Image (tube, rainbow, N blue to C red):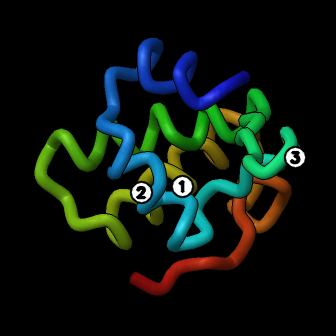
Amino acid sequence: MKTSEILQQINIPRHKLYYLEQKGYVTPQRIPMGDLETREYSREDLTKIKFIWKYLMLGFKHKVAYEMAMKELASINGTNGKGAASNGVLEA
């Protein structure tokens, strides 16, 4: 899924999406296109972004929003939060 599709589907500002990437909360694949590169987000990235954005919109700070999103995803997936949905990045 391309950046523009994520922005449209979730209605998150581009700079917020890139900040989540900068912090390591999501890791889209980067695909070279000549001198530029494009980002390709997985379904897992999309789900993480949706949940993190939900908590950011509720007023939580990025670190807390990420932690809450990962806990919610873990409860939905029936894991303890240390599986694929959690990459251990909890610093803000």
Identified at 33% across, 32% down, the residue is 12
Crowd around label 1: few <14 · some 14–19 · many ≥20 (10 Å): some
Q: Residue at 74% x, 48% y: name it.
A: 36
Q: Mark 2 highlights which residue? A: 68
47 lies above or below 53: above
Q: Please say if the residues under marks 1 and 2 sit with CB atoms less than 8 Å apart.
A: yes
Question: What amino acid is at disc 1?
Answer: Lys
Q: Nearer the viewer, mark 2 or mark 3?
A: 3
- SS type, badge 2: helix
Label 2 to label 3: alpha-carbon separation: 33 Å
- Position of residue 91 relative to residue 50, above or below, is below
Q: Please identify the quadrant where the N terminus is shown.
A: top right
Inter-mark Cα distance, 1 to 2: 5 Å
Q: Which tag is nearer the camera, tag 3 or tag 1?
A: 3
Disc 2 residue crowd, few under 14, some 14–19, many 20+, Cα 10 Å? some
**Disc 3 on helix, strand or loop?**
strand
Query: In the figure, is residue 47 to the left or right of 18?
Result: right
Residue drawn at x 53%, y 22% is 4
* Disc 3 target residue: 32
Q: Secondary structure at mark 1?
A: helix
Q: Which mark is residue 71?
A: 1
Residue type, label 3: Pro
